[in-house]
Image (cartoon, rainbow, N blue to C red):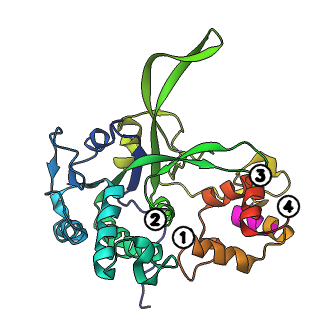
């Protein structure tokens, strides 16, 4: 046989992305990972005693520094990119230069071609490059700022949601790429005084590792949602004593309200989503086309390539999704 078949779980380097508000401690957090070296894209680690590359001034500079670690993977155990929203700006400037235009909206003649190119190049030039590093056993930590976006719902009042501060087509591929996506925020205690809520005491810095309606997060290691902002909850994972878990992407067909489970009488959450959309007049073909056009999956893929957490979130907001796709309520 031409290929060697292997069995069982394999230990590999870890893809982690952590995002949060400015000043919460993302760079300091990353400094506690095993033997880190920074590519400090925005020059924010000057006050940290860490190893770093020169601040890249162009997209090509950034890629060359990643290539240097690929060529010499013993240079570090963890490569930290600080931050990917600044890295995306370098790519944006590169595209504007190549397209001889002053706006991404005008790139390639417009009609969204600029954002498509941004997504494709970020995946091909950047994330795929980092995967080569992962294959050599070097962990990768991507840091990013957070931005708040208001979500509209036809049934519920609008609410705010924290997301990665990158473009709408780049965010999904980063989230799917990561083994661990951490959202960092302050936990503020409030008390009611004279009918008004007021903050009390010092805000604790927390990190969250599971998806919630108000923020994106995920992990493949069974991490709890509410953790102090520290490397300690991750130490056993990086020391290799906690194996990666199989992603829970099925829900009970007899009692969907029970949520995601693992048993013999279960159905893939993506299949449930497509069936519910069909009942609302949305065909699988139309759904696939929308997923591709919005950058949620790559060209040539199908809904089956959508992450389980993303599919579950769509089920939770099925009416809003149907309205977006133009189906019936």
Is there a contact, CB below 8 Å, between mark 1 and mark 2?
yes
Mark 3 neighbour class, 10 Å CA radius: few under 14, some 14 to 19, many 20 or more: few
Whether the residues at callouts 4 and 1 have beta carbons within 8 Å, the answer is no
Q: Residue at x 43, y 58 (%)?
A: 166
Residue at the disc numbered 2: 170
Q: Which residue is mark 1?
A: 295
Per the picture, the main secondary structure of the magenta-coloured stretch is helix
Q: Is residue 241 visible?
A: no
SS of the residue at dot 3? loop
Count of all numbered marks drawn on residues in the image = 4
* Residue contact at pointers 3 and 2, CB within 8 angstroms: no
C-alpha distance separating marks 4 and 1: 25 Å
Q: Which residue is mark 3?
A: 154
Cβ–Cβ under 8 Å for marks 3 and 1: no
Indicate the secondary structure of the residue bearing disc 1.
Answer: loop
Q: Label 1 crowding class (10 Å Cα cut-off): few <14, some 14-19, many 20+?
A: some
């Amino acid at each position: 046989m031409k290929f060697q078949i292997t069995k069982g779980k394999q230990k590999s380097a870890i893809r982690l992305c952590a995002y949060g508000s400015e000043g919460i401690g993302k760079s300091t957090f990353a400094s506690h990972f095993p033997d880190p070296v920074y590519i400090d894209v925005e020059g924010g680690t000057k006050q940290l005693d860490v190893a770093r590359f020169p601040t890249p001034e162009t997209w090509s500079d950034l890629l060359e520094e990643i290539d240097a670690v690929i060529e010499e993977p013993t240079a570090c155990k963890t490569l930290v990119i600080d931050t990917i929203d600044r890295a995306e700006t370098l790519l944006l400037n590169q595209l504007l230069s190549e397209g001889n235009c002053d706006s991404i909206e005008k790139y390639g003649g417009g009609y969204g071609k600029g954002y498509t190119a941004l997504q494709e190049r970020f995946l091909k030039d950047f994330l795929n490059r980092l995967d080569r590093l992962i294959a050599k056993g070097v962990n990768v930590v991507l840091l990013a700022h957070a931005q708040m976006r208001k979500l509209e719902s036809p049934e519920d009042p609008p609410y705010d949601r924290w997301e990665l501060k990158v473009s709408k087509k780049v965010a999904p591929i980063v989230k799917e790429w990561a083994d661990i996506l951490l959202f960092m925020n302050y936990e503020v205690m409030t008390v009611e005084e004279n009918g008004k809520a007021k903050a009390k005491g010092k805000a604790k810095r927390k990190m969250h590792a599971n998806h919630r309606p108000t923020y994106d997060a995920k992990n493949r290691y069974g991490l709890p949602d509410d953790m102090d902002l520290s490397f300690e909850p991750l130490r056993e994972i990086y020391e290799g004593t906690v194996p990666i878990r199989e992603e829970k992407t099925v829900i009970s067909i007899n009692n969907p309200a029970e949520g995601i489970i693992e048993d013999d009488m279960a159905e893939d959450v993506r299949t449930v989503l497509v069936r519910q959309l069909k009942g609302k007049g949305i065909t699988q073909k139309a759904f696939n086309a929308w997923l591709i056009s919005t950058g949620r999956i790559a060209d040539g893929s199908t809904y089956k390539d959508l992450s389980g957490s993303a599919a579950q979130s769509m089920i939770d907001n099925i009416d809003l999704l149907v309205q977006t796709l133009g189906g019936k309520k």
